[in-house]
Image (cartoon, rainbow, N blue to C red):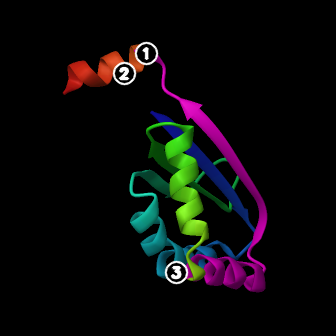
Amino acid sequence: MIIDLRIYTCKPNKMAAFVKLYEEKAWPLQLKYLENCLGWHTTVEGPLNRVVHMWGYTDQGDRERRRSAMAADPAWGAYLQAAADGDLLLDMENRILKRTPFFDAYLAKKG
């Protein structure tokens, strides 16, 4: 399994608007195409105005297939345009993570 970690930095006082837009327009599409959300959070301490979400995939090919299918949906393009028009974000980061074998063993024991 790989994890796609995404960190979005919102403009000051724009995080609530971004979260609302995402919940209404992007969340249903991402659940439809990406399916495996591992977490969706906003920062409380540390660097503020950040949204962090994680998506699990079998491998990079699985990720690319799912994201390509989502990108082909006109509703995804409409969401991206609405986000751009709202001028809500300062920065977007994306990292691909792979779990360590000892953590997989821990999860297997935990059941």
Instruction: Say the numbered circle drawn on residue 101.
Output: 1
Residue 73 in the image, given as x and y percentages of width and height: 55, 76
**Of the residues under marks 1 and 3, which one precedes in the sequence?**
3
Q: Amino acid at mark 3?
A: Lys
Give the image quarter of residue 110.
top left
Q: Which residues are magenta?
A: 75-101
Q: Residue at x 48, y 76 (%)?
A: 23
Whether tag 1 and tag 2 are in contact, CB under 8 A, the answer is yes
Q: Amino acid at mark 2?
A: Asp
Instruction: Say the numbered circle drawn on residue 104.
Output: 2
Name the residue nearer the viewer: 64 or 78.
Answer: 64
**Of the residues under marks 2 and 3, which one precedes in the sequence?**
3
Q: For this view, does 105 lie left or right of residue 84?
A: left
Whether tag 2 and tag 3 are in contact, CB under 8 A, the answer is no
Above or below for 44 versus 72: above
Q: What is the CA distance from the residue labelled 1 to the residue labelled 2?
A: 5 Å
Kindly identify which residue carries mark 3: 25
Q: Amino acid at mark 1?
A: Pro
Q: For this view, does 100 lie left or right of residue 103?
A: right
Above or below for 73 versus 64: below
Q: Which residue extends farthest left?
A: 111
